[in-house]
Image (spheres, rainbow, N blue to C red):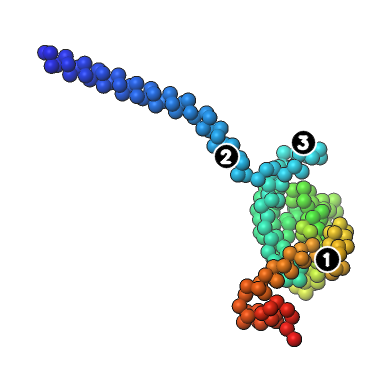
Amino acid sequence: MTSWKLIKAMSSWKLIAVNLLITFVLFNLAYWFVPTWYLLRNVLASTEAPDDVRARLPNYANVTWATQHYRELSQLKSDYKSFIGWRHEPFQGKTINIGGRYAQRQTVNDGRDKSKKVYFFGGSTMWGVGVRDDGTIPSEFATATGFWSENFGELAYTAHQGLVLLVQLLQDGHRPDVVVFYDGVNDVEAKCRLELTPNSHLFEAIIDRRLSNLAATEPPATLRRFGASPTGSSPN
């Protein structure tokens, strides 16, 4: 009888100990959860790029998509393209969509008649920095006139680059009824600098440096294929 009472007492103490342990663990989880969560949130937030200050400009006071737009803008990447410099890689977002053979910003042409086509060229203003696809100049023009519009603008483009792109389009068989160029700022910034020329674009110096580095690192046989000497100077 005494042994049975002893066993029962030990079982009770074990139950109490287990309950105390569980209570202790739960209490610590609850106690440390909030500060740990805040710490993790701050660490994760610090690794993200801060929101673009342009999204807080007064003209976006009642606009819900501004922050999303500038986040998408920061995610864009570009490919090098011969003669015209660069074009954006394909991209699908809520405010920015880029695609097609010529890597164009999407123009909203819902229900437009393709019998009249208008091609637009320019820099970031024509491309549409700060607005959704339906708010670019080509999209607004299509809505106002009913003409089919195409946006061939690109960030940082000069008029020279847009003209070369137009020539490529004509070579590919395109025949627009109207062509619109909207340039100026990038031309002044690129073509009025001492280190550049009237034929330069904004990234000429960057590309030149990278080609110079290529001449210093590539095997001589590779460089001769492109008409360059191993020292980086022009061949005779």
Classify 2 as above or below 139: above
Q: Secondary structure at mark 1?
A: loop
Q: Image point 86% across, 64% down: which residue? A: 194
Q: Image point 41% across, 25% down: which residue? A: 26
Residue 106's disc number: none
Local crowd size for mark 2, using a 10 Å CA cut-off: few (<14), some (14–19), many (≥20): few
Residue 62's disc number: 3
Residue 43's disc number: 2
Drawn side of residue 186 relative to residue 222, left or right: right
* Residue at the extreme left: 1
What is the C-alpha distance between the residues marked 1 and 2? 43 Å
Q: Secondary structure at mark 3?
A: loop
Q: Quadrant of the C terminus?
A: bottom right
Question: Residue 84's spot in the image, x, y percent?
Answer: 76, 68
Q: Amino acid at mark 1?
A: Glu
Question: Residue 35's spot in the image, x, y percent?
Answer: 53, 30
Quarter residue 182 falls in? bottom right
Q: Quadrant of the N terminus?
A: top left
**Viewer can see residue 120:** no
**Viewer can see residue 49:** yes
Q: Amino acid at mark 2?
A: Val
**Disc 3 vs disc 2: which is toward the camera?**
2
Task: Tell me the residue that label 1 is attached to.
Answer: 195
Local crowd size for mark 3, using a 10 Å CA cut-off: few (<14), some (14–19), many (≥20): few
